[in-house]
Amino acid sequence: MQEFTFDTFRDLLNSFRESGYKIIPFSSFLSENKNSQKLLILRHDVDRYPLQTLKMAGMEADQSITATYYFRIIPSVCKPDIIKEVVKLGHEIGYHYEDLSLCKGNYANSISHFKKSLQYLRQFYPVTTICMHGSPLSKWDNKRLWEKYDYRDFGLAGDTAFDINYDEVFYISDNGWGWNKTAVSVRDKVASEFNIPIRNTRHLMELIHNNNLPDKIMLNAHPDTFFEPGLRWHMNKIFIKSKNIIKRQIVKYNLIK
């Protein structure tokens, strides 16, 4: 099994469904009866390569799967045509906010930028949920914006950082070319009582089929991690592994708070 291809990801989602997980976007989780069934909250942080996002959104739609796609507002990612197509495919759109980093720690400018960015995205979809971008090389933690303001004042129902109990929902992220590689995750991690090592995707699928995972899971799969086999797949792997060298030092020496 080749890691982080679209075929592998399709097989992973099928494993969840075959094991009885209902796959839902984050907004649905906020209103679901969380005590009655196995749930997989499917989340995609769109950090780079919006065309990869469209491929993933199409693949999921072909399987009647609805996910949440969190778009950064930067021009290289926030492509209106891509967002419109993802919406047409039936997915939820959210704001992948990084306003505190973009505004260099100025809280007043950051909340103004947040409001404008949210209004912009709402041209394409009635955004009700948000998710902070980790900005691993920035000294500003974007979710600290809510120490001074309240995101609910903007008609938002939830933030993935604050509206999930991660002692009840197992968080899985593909950050750093692996599953829950905390040694290279600067901010893409949560405080949780769960401690379930995942060696690779095949191992993750074994855990699913053997019912060795909790009933409630959030899966964060970055579309820019996944490529068809070939040159771009290899180049992307090298790019991510190179970033990991820097991120590993940041985490090891606690260089960013």
Image (cartoon, rainbow, N blue to C red):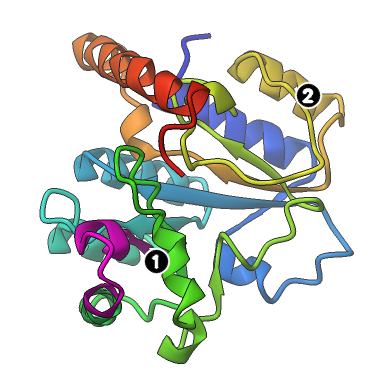
Is residue 124 toward the left or the right of residue 182 in the image? left
Q: Position of residue 167 (x, y in %)?
A: 80, 50
* Residue at the image point whose x is 21% and y is 39% from the top: 49
Q: Amino acid at mark 1?
A: Gly
Q: Residues within 10 Å of mark 2 (few under 14, many from 20)?
A: some
Membership of 163 in magenta stretch = no
* Residue placed furthest toward the left: 75
* Residue at the image point whose x is 82% and y is 42% from the top: 193
Q: Nearer the viewer, mark 2 or mark 1?
A: 1
Disc number for residue 153: none
Q: Position of residue 79 (x, y in %)?
A: 15, 57
State which tag comes first along the sequence, 2 or 1: 1
Instruction: Check contact, mark 2 vs mark 1: CB within 8 A.
Output: no
Residue 36 visible in the displayed image = yes
Q: Position of residue 123 (x, y in %)?
A: 22, 81
| Residue occupied by mark 1 | 94
Q: Amino acid at mark 2?
A: Leu
* Residue at the image point whose x is 81% and y is 53% from the top: 168
Residue 181 visible in the displayed image = no
Membership of 97 in magenta stretch = yes
Is residue 88 toward the left or the right of residue 196 in the image? left
Q: How many marks?
A: 2
Q: Quadrant of residue 121?
A: bottom left
Q: Secondary structure at mark 2?
A: helix
Toward the viewer: 193 or 210? 193
Q: Residues within 10 Å of mark 1 (few under 14, many from 20)?
A: many
| Residue occupied by mark 2 | 207
Residue range in magenta is 94-110
Q: Is residue 25 above or below residue 219?
A: below
* Residue at the image point whose x is 38% and y is 19% from the top: 244
Q: Secondary structure at mark 1?
A: strand
